[in-house]
Image (tube, coloured by chain):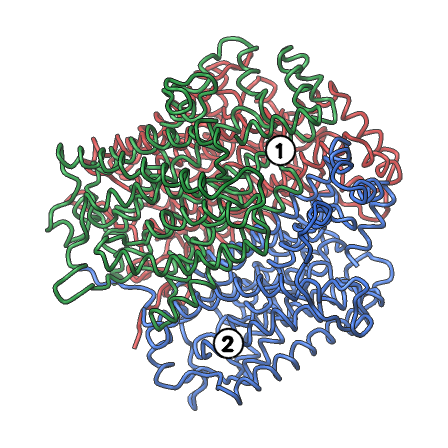
Chain colours: A blue, B red, C green
Amino acid sequence: MRKLLLFTALSALGLTSAYAQAEAAGPETLDAFKATPEYAKFMIDNLWILISAALVFIMHLGFASVEAGMCQRKNTVNIMFKNVFIVCIGAVGYMLWGFNAMYPGDAWSAADIFALGSPISKGFASDADQVANLTNAYADYTYWSDFIFQAMFAATAATIVSGAVAERVKLTSFMIYATILVTFLYPVTGSWEWGAGWLDDKDFADFAGSSLVHAFGGFAALAAVIVLGPRKGKFTKDGIKPILPSNLPLANIGVFLLFLGWFGFNGGSVLSADAAGVSFVFVTTAMAGFTGGLGAIATSWIVLKKPDLSMALNGMLAGLVGITAGADTIPPYAALAVGAIAGVIVVLSVTFFDKIKIDDPVGAISVHGVCGIWGTLCVAIFGTTEGVTFGVQLLGTLSISAFAFVTSFAVFYAIKLIMGVRVDEQEEHEGLDVAEHGSPAYNDSTP
Amino acid sequence: MRKLLLFTALSALGLTSAYAQAEAAGPETLDAFKATPEYAKFMIDNLWILISAALVFIMHLGFASVEAGMCQRKNTVNIMFKNVFIVCIGAVGYMLWGFNAMYPGDAWSAADIFALGSPISKGFASDADQVANLTNAYADYTYWSDFIFQAMFAATAATIVSGAVAERVKLTSFMIYATILVTFLYPVTGSWEWGAGWLDDKDFADFAGSSLVHAFGGFAALAAVIVLGPRKGKFTKDGIKPILPSNLPLANIGVFLLFLGWFGFNGGSVLSADAAGVSFVFVTTAMAGFTGGLGAIATSWIVLKKPDLSMALNGMLAGLVGITAGADTIPPYAALAVGAIAGVIVVLSVTFFDKIKIDDPVGAISVHGVCGIWGTLCVAIFGTTEGVTFGVQLLGTLSISAFAFVTSFAVFYAIKLIMGVRVDEQEEHEGLDVAEHGSPAYNDSTP
Amino acid sequence: MRKLLLFTALSALGLTSAYAQAEAAGPETLDAFKATPEYAKFMIDNLWILISAALVFIMHLGFASVEAGMCQRKNTVNIMFKNVFIVCIGAVGYMLWGFNAMYPGDAWSAADIFALGSPISKGFASDADQVANLTNAYADYTYWSDFIFQAMFAATAATIVSGAVAERVKLTSFMIYATILVTFLYPVTGSWEWGAGWLDDKDFADFAGSSLVHAFGGFAALAAVIVLGPRKGKFTKDGIKPILPSNLPLANIGVFLLFLGWFGFNGGSVLSADAAGVSFVFVTTAMAGFTGGLGAIATSWIVLKKPDLSMALNGMLAGLVGITAGADTIPPYAALAVGAIAGVIVVLSVTFFDKIKIDDPVGAISVHGVCGIWGTLCVAIFGTTEGVTFGVQLLGTLSISAFAFVTSFAVFYAIKLIMGVRVDEQEEHEGLDVAEHGSPAYNDSTP
């Protein structure tokens, strides 16, 4: 939908046609287009998408740092290894399959519901092919910018799961699972909305992915955690045993880098450098993140009776997840409310999942899953877009979350049957770093 | 002043009028404006302000990391919690009060001296309101960009104080103090210059805030430290006991992120993407930061007889603070001198404050306060702007520093009388992390 | 060559002449140019070079963090101190000598082979001088942008060496060596290609410096390591003793920041914000980095029998170094191969250098040196540029590597004769932090 809207907008301004014409006519005419004032706008739109891709890239360092900081020292190498693998395989899988499965154009296998993937633009034979690949008739950025921005998004879904299954998941099993999730499953729900599928047909609104990215990842994580079971020693007969985070400065670095990356995640989802659009999104995004932090600080102080840093950090993330679906349409004062309520929700949700013995070491299910749903509903509650209804928002976010939960459960359960998904008790006790990687994360011995 | 200058410049180019016209006429005409070549310039100017806002945002991670790295391990959670709170409350307070207090336009309470604040642009009822809020007739970026860039700046003032009072300040007292400082006090001196107040009338020059941000924060910090007193065990009968930094790689990360953010702090203060302007500011800013590092390395090697990493890092920051007032007018070779001298000053100043028993764990008073004054004077010493005089620069920086010192002292002292500002000796000894937050920052126990 | 190509391209579009005209005529006409649509393109090109400079700047934090994380805890302060010094002195030296030595224009001392350096644009006397300095008739960005972008590049060469000589090099000796390397030696080979020297005459292609930056640094490092010798206790009678990394989360931060910075390193080397050009470079750069990670993961799993995080991280860097020479011409699918093979090479190369008792604590010689050569050859193997031949690529990369090796050896050996290059055994055992800097990096003692 995002692209279609843009196409319409551009057509209205007479930009698309000039560009499409230029492109259709081949390189020479492309040079002619480059000499027009319209090309300056194209350049800046395109550059902003690329800078946004770089900002989303750094979110992967954010995720790795949050997860490593929140978990135990003995599993740190394992966590970072998983994250390096996910971003690498995620982008490659997206290039070879996911991008075309998510944006099928007219090539649906089942109309508006499912499309097969394929490698991006195969032809590199002729100059005309090159031009076609380098440019993009349907938007104000190149085909390559489109791909790399979306590729950086794709891997985040699997990374969300990584945090929830940390400290006891078997490495090879997780690598297989994550590859399937990001390459084959994420693009399906993506196509429903951003690929102009059935949810887009119903005027479902999810600007930058409260549902399509975050709730997807959060509910995939929930399924994986149910299949996997809690860490040994977390839920004992004597109650819940807190497992302390190993490195909160590292978690702090991670959260602030995620916040920074969100300016590209949401800001780049404007899909242009439109002055009013990007400015508005920056304000709603940042302010919701800030009130998310305040909401979680206040709530955790009341509920947990102490000023809790982990909750404050998760609160900022919760606010950001919450505003992601409506960052383009929810007015700034409403964004304050969206974030603050997300900050309240995340504290209650983390406490709730602990109570029902769902062990999620970093709170990923609450931050991304629960607040992803909250954010999607907020577009109807606080947003100003005509045609958006609470019913469709609810239908959409539940459909996406259900799809993520069911397929994640099926895949992870199948892997469990075939090869197991959990390290043995001795390894878990020792820590995965030494057991699986033969190397501790920190070596302190100084003569 | 910055905005007025810009307005004049834009008018000269015939841009403002076109834009103002477009805006006055409502959305349809705005679309017409968007189809003009002038809009491409508006887009890029606006985008640069937004990217700068993101860069200034990451300075908050820089501040938190420097402070946590330079202080003791046992107070790390407390430090990061304070920093998360400050950036959250700072931005919200700026939205609800500070922005309009700092840029009053014609709405002064006492002409050119003081203005009451209010929430930013209240009306969201009509389309025309939306357009008015999304655009900005007086500058080449939107109202939202203006706000979010300035909001990111605002919280830095309180963050500077955070470092100086670390390791013994009472959390709730500091939270109240920081909220007042950033929301109500910082905008007052801000209005004197950037809000076109009395210092602007006198042709005072402070490009990006050597005085308005850094000296303000540094002298507010000095007052708070005097009210608070030194850490237990720092100044003993047997002399000054060094309290070692807990994590220098973390401090190193912090300083480099601050340096990175400074490209937005100073570069964004050009208030456009003007090619000559931003390029010039990048060069002067970076080179002063580099010679600041070299100046501090040399000085500390001579004075302290060793190559001191903390001083090298603080030297880079000192150089950056030093160039901030004149990054737009001080020629590049002079910028080398501005930075190098700031690097010398900061080492001597840190040593001096230690001697007079002002306990500033991170050197914030020296880096931001003393070098902030130095930088402001440099505009007259090395700058090339007509109308700038040493006398007015001195008057301005002293006025701002004095206002910060006096009001900070009054507020912090009042809080001391009402509820105390210091943790008890047992808590200070134990560390604030466990005592106030119930959670250590690092947990190393590995089976 | 990069600039000349651009000049041609711009002339074709009629941009350069407009700008050159405007500039020749002085400030008034410059204002007139600013009112033309062409100026919007100039603004965005220029801004992208500046943002790229900021991205390359943050690579210095990346290098410091990788090096500190991969080495022993007891040498961490020393490593960070070296890195702070290098970036500071590197930029200052480049301003005072290197820039003009690398881009001599017509001022060669020996035609196309060697030019003396000098301070950048001396004149600041008149308005016309200012304009001349602020603008740049030969490219679509200002003189200042050109300088600061290249200055950020320059220091990376010495930083590469820093990693290889870590943990036993004498601080003052290294400081002298690094200053000479970055100021006087790096610009020589730089001038051969980017300064339009003899390699450029032969149609050698090295887009962003697989050879000119990375192989240069890697082979300078090899020479320095040979002069210096291995760390005590690394190669014993009983075989190779692994020296464990002290802080892998820090190394992880470093590698991801380097990856982020590479978007500016390669992306900015387009020397404009050309939409097709920068998009293409982002895709090839990122994808090669990702397959580099996958290649190293697979290879190290087979060769070392474990999923090795250090190798995965070095694999991403190897892929990035590999694509750097041809990021603008190697098609995206070929970029997958370039990166994957670099990932294989780096694991084998690290193992090889260990076997021949070349002790390189961070693998800099393999990542930058060996993969730098690989990347340079890839332009001929996978690239599509007319005139590029395998023979010239081989000649070029070997010439540059040989020059780096020989001059680095000579300078470091001379320093060894004069003042020694190695700390004494007792200091090495104790760690350089306490011995040379009087301060450990981490202080954990908590009451």
Q: Please name the residue shown 38% across and 25% down the image.
A: C113
Label 2 resides on the chain identified as A
Q: Please name the residue shown 75% across and 36% down the image.
A: A28
- Tell me if C57 is positioned left or right of C359 in this view: right
Q: Based on the displayed image, in which of its 4 quarters is residue A249 positioned?
A: bottom left
Q: Please name the residue shown 22% across and 45% down the image.
A: B235
Amino acid at pointer 1: Asp
Amino acid at pointer 2: Phe
**Residue positioned most to the top:** C126
Residue A233, labelled with which disc?
A: none
Q: How many marks?
A: 2
- Tell me if B122 is positioned left or right of C417 in this view: right
Relative depth, front residue between B295 and B105: B295
Name the image quarter holding the N terminus of chain A. Answer: bottom right
Label 2: few (<14), some (14–19) or many (≥20) C-alpha neighbours in 10 Å: many
Residue C243: give x, y in percent of width and height.
Answer: 24, 61
Q: To which residue does mark 1 refer?
A: C45
Relative depth, front residue between B423 and A288: A288
Q: Up-down: is B281 above or below A215? A: above
Residue C232: give x, y in percent of width and height.
Answer: 15, 55
Residue C357: give x, y in percent of width and height.
Answer: 21, 56
Q: To which residue does mark 2 refer?
A: A174
Q: Up-down: is C305 above or below C210? A: below
Q: Based on the displayed image, in which of its 4 quarters is residue C420 positioned?
A: top left
